Image (tube, rainbow, N blue to C red):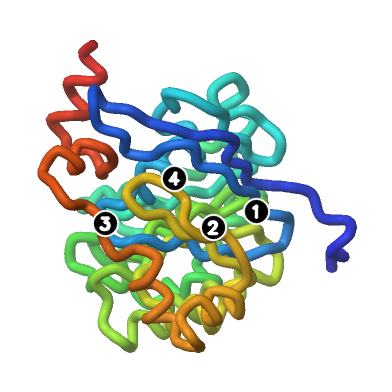
Amino acid sequence: MTQPNDRRPMIEADGLSKFYGPFAASRDINFSVMQGELVAFLGPNGAGKSTTMKMLTGYIAPSEGEARIAGFNMMEDRIEGSKHLGYLPESGPLYMEMTPAGMLDFFAEARGLTGAKKRDRIEAVVDICDLSSVMFKAISKLSKGFKQRVGMSQALLHDPDVLILDEPTAGLDPNQIRGVRATMRRLAETKTILLSTHILQEVEAMADRVVMINEGRMVFSGDVQSLSTAGDGDLNEAFHRLTASKKKTGDDDQDSAEPTPSQESKAEAS
């Protein structure tokens, strides 16, 4: 097991900002996730969490700042950085007409896995994500919980050091959440994880540290106990105090927001 003083930063946000015209989806985000940590990424809807995660993974380019995975700049060395990264966006990349077996085989080949290595990695992620009972069913026929597990399995297929997971329990029922939480605990034994969630019980049960943003800006970075103290021992109260809107006028709404698809399209066109 990695000792705390031997840890190195595996996920780094260094002054990350993303602007869409006058909109700031995120502004000057700075934090690191050290090797072996599970860090919860919190914030209300529209706070800029998904935008920040997309910049960290190299999916979108920052307007300012730098994102690094395992030391690799995700704009300059994205291919090398991606070898260390497993990313599960909020709506995971699933081909509904495929079966989990077919999709994993496809992604394994796309990742350059062949022969015994491919077989071993598919077997490993099927075990980790508990997919054996649905391997030959069409993904379109699976429950949302199983679809989330299939998405997780493809993120783990190449055995990455780092996982960035965008609300993997969104829309799941309590039993499905319990299953995903058990998977997270297993993965946290060997991986570095940044996990966005709205479920504060998950934070208390699993996270080493918390990073919180609101209206595109960081408002907290610290351990779970410090966050609880900010709410007089209540995580829900701490969340409310740190993210309650201070907007007074309609003009302030222009400062920070998660971009709409039309804003993203206009920014890309320009």
| Residue assigned mark 3 | 246
Q: For the residue marked with disc 2, what is the amino acid? A: Leu
Image quadrant holding the C terminus, namely top left
Q: Residue 188: name its quadrant.
A: bottom right
Mark sitting on residue 33: 1
| Residue assigned mark 2 | 194
User: Which of the marked residues, 1 or 4, is nearer the chain's N terminus?
Assistant: 1
Proximity of marks 2 and 3: CB atoms separated by less than 8 Å: no
User: Which of the marked residues, 2 or 4, is nearer the chain's N terminus?
Assistant: 4
Q: Measuring 23% from the left and 71% from the top, which residue is drawn there? A: 171
Mark sitting on residue 53: 4
Count the marks: how many?
4
The residues tagged by marks 1 and 4 sit, at their Cα atoms, a distance apart of 13 Å
3 vs 4, front mark:
3
The residues tagged by marks 2 and 1 sit, at their Cα atoms, a distance apart of 7 Å
Image position, residue 12 (x, y; %): 62, 42
Query: Around disc 2, counting alpha carbons within 10 Å, would you say few (fewer than 14), some (14 to 19), or many (20 or more)?
Result: many
The residues tagged by marks 3 and 4 sit, at their Cα atoms, a distance apart of 24 Å
Q: For the residue marked with disc 4, what is the amino acid? A: Met
User: Which of the marked residues, 2 or 1, is nearer the chain's N terminus?
Assistant: 1
